Amino acid sequence: MRQQILPERTVRYLRAAASAGLACWLLAGCSLLAPFEVERHEKALCDLRNQGFLSFKQAKLADAERLYRQAGLEAQTLGDVRTKATVAKELGDIYSAEGKLKEAETCYRDFLALVPHPGNDDATDYAGTLSALAAVLEKQGRLAQSEAFYKAAFQYADNLESGGYRIRHDLRRQYARFLKKVGKISEAKKLESLEGQMLLEHAYEFDPDADEATATRKNATWNGLCDQALKEQYRGNTAGAERLLKQALAVVESSGKRDRRVPRTYEHLGNLYLSSNQLPAAQASYKKEIALLEAVLRSDDIMLATPLESLGLTYLRQKKYSAAEAALKRALAIQRTTCGDEDKHTVLFGLALADYFANQKRFSDAAPLYKKVLESSLRLPQLATPSLAMSLERLGDALCKSGQYAQARLFYKRSLTIRQGLAAGDAVLAGLVAKIHCAESKIQCP
């Protein structure tokens, strides 16, 4: 990703601050860098995307195309790279539906170029875009290129965490269909065999009294309710999402305690409650999920790691610190034992525990974990997320206050590098430059 170039006004601030040695003045001046019209552009961008989405769902493709094109211009005006990428993908979907294959291809390639190292939040969109580009190329008869993107989508999705089951299922099925089309029958059959095992594990194995048709219908109903609940959650309709998830739970609870869709539904409920700050309800849902999993799995099974981390974060927000620490430590231990120290999820779980220690001002416990995350982020670009940048900056602040300026500078510089790669705003970048100057000058930042 291209490194962000600071505007001339920002450069003048930095030069003035460097020559005068006045980091405080620089920090005070950062607010001047924010344009007065940002809020207006952000509202326009949001409105255009919402209207475009509704037009697309109503099959008003010409209107949807026009609205998303305007949204792309707003995102460009704001310098919001991530939203610009998302709008490009959504516009590509519209072009594809209209049969404008070349235009769709351009939009999908734009998304991939703007998000070269997707983090957790972008992973599913990235895999889906690879597959969408493959489909567009297939429709143009460019089969060799299409196969490469189908394979890349399948391989990328196969590395997603357990929550990516649905996208893995869809992409595996699409790739198998394509392989049959180009005459690679044996490879397609291997994929179909693997897909059959996955379906059995996730849908049929724990529903022994139902025939295959009934089990398939029940699974489709459950999936539909969960998908609709997620959409309602994104719209801010927490009550509607909760109602749909409870309906989904009723569909699969009759299958028995070994049906993995039951704890998965409790996980969805926990995430919903956590996002709406209903912390006791979130805690109860995650504990129910963990209890159901522990009834049929080993105590160190990898499927327990994510709900344990979620439970730990829920405890943390309720200031139940000892319970939070125990849950986060157990989640990290399971992840590390199963996947090793270099696995990206091990690193992210370590980051959650490091943040907990930092919030408790236990910096001697936090620092080794943060350093491990920092080292891993250099090797694994997908770990370079805004949350990591914020955590590294926070640790730099703590080290600066304790007089450990060299260590503080190390964390500030890595935070700055990450934020430059993510195209952060000028004020954020200038603030970090000022903090690095403070650390180098061995003075306290205000």
Image: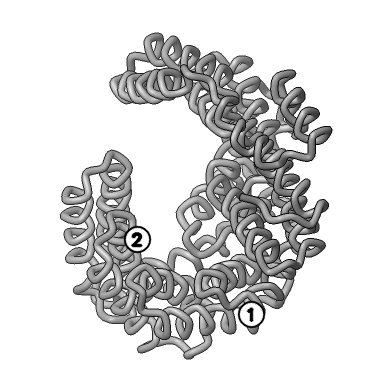
Asked whether the viewer can see residue 2, the reply is no
Using the image, determine if residue 27 lies above or below residue 372.
above
Residue type at mark 1? Asp
Q: Is 122 left, or right, of 315 in this rendering?
A: right
On the image, the x and y values in percent for residue 316 come to 40, 72
The residue at 73%/70% (across/down) is 372
- Is the residue marked by circle 1 packed among few (<14), some (14-19), or many (20+) residues within 10 Å? some
Q: Based on the displayed image, in which of its 4 quarters is residue 296 positioned? A: bottom left
**Of helix, strand and loop, which one carries label 1?**
helix
Q: Between residue 251 and residue 7, name the one nearer to us.
A: 7
The residue at 79%/58% (across/down) is 410
Q: Is 358 left, or right, of 309 in this rendering?
A: right
Q: Between residue 188 and residue 231, name the one nearer to us.
A: 231
Q: Is 117 left, or right, of 125 in this rendering?
A: right
The residue at 27%/66% (across/down) is 279
Asked whether the viewer can see residue 371, the reply is yes
Residue type at mark 2? Asn
- Dot 1 or dot 2: first in sequence order is 2
Say which quadrant the N terminus sits in.
top right
Q: Which residue is mark 1?
A: 365
Closer to viewer: mark 1 or mark 2? 1
Using the image, determine if residue 240 lies above or below residue 11.
below
Verify CB contact (< 8 Å) between mark 1 and mark 2: no
On the image, the x and y values in percent for residue 187 come to 68, 54
On the image, the x and y values in percent for residue 216 come to 31, 59
The alpha-carbon separation of the residues under discs 1 and 2 comes to: 28 Å
The residue at 63%/36% (across/down) is 424
Q: Which circle marks residue 271 in the picture? A: 2
Q: Between residue 54 and residue 248, name the one nearer to us.
A: 54
Q: Between residue 57 and residue 97, name the one nearer to us.
A: 57
Q: Is 148 left, or right, of 295 in this rendering?
A: right
- Is the residue marked by circle 2 packed among few (<14), some (14-19), or many (20+) residues within 10 Å? many
